Amino acid sequence: MNYVYIACSIDGFIAKPDGNLDWLINIPNPQNNDFGFSKFMENIDGIIMGRNTFETVLGFSEWPYLKHVFVLSNTIKNLPASVKGKASIVSGNIKDIIRSLNKNEIKNIYVDGGKAIQSFLKEGLIDEMIITTIAKIIGDGIPLFGNIGIEKHYKVDKVEMLNENMVKIYYKRKEI
């Protein structure tokens, strides 16, 4: 199973045009709640993320993942020493990558990053999405879905109001 767990603005952006996430980081959270992310990660075997998202995460003060990260990239050849044993590079056909990971017992995969998510959607490889909408319009940025060029059908499985700033919607792929 391949999952998306992501936040976006009301106007559908996951980051500002330069990839900046400050609009998301500055959401009031006085109790430092992770809003279910740790529970979600308990059922995940590995993470696939795009190069741009990986480069953004490298800029965080500490590596946020306990699960192995597979960086989807045709341009990165070597990873920094700081992520040795925590991340590896994968490239090529997405379906082949998934088959290879599944053979190695990486069956529940968290897909992260706008372009990675779009690529997986185009291939029909996203089973479930958990999208938290932040009550903010940022006006311009990197779109969550962009123009994937095909229609996909999902059903709403559950809706949670997390606080006055966030609504989390759970979607499951709907076969037609």
Image: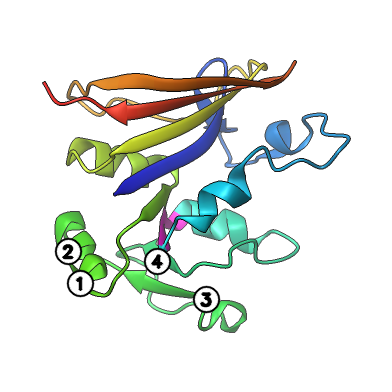
The mark nearer the N terminus, 3 or 4, is 4
Residue for badge 4 = 70
Q: Residue at x 41, y 75 (%)?
A: 88
The mark nearer the N terminus, 1 or 4, is 4
Q: Which-is-in-front pick, marks 4 and 2?
A: 2
Q: Quadrant of residue 160?
A: top right
> Which amino acid lies under the numbered mark 1 shown in the image of this protein?
Lys
Q: Residue at x 56, y 77 (%)?
A: 83
Where residue 103 is drawn, which disc sits there?
1
Residue 123 shown in magenta: no
Q: Distance between the Cα atoms at labels 1 and 4? A: 15 Å
Viewer-closest of 60 and 141: 60
Residue for badge 2 = 99
Q: Distance between the Cα atoms at labels 1 and 3? A: 19 Å
Asked if labels 3 and 1 touch by Cβ distance under 8 angstroms, the answer is no
Q: Which-is-in-front pick, marks 1 and 3?
A: 1
Magenta part of the chain: 46-51
Where residue 86 is drawn, which disc sits there?
3
Asked if labels 2 and 1 touch by Cβ distance under 8 angstroms, the answer is yes
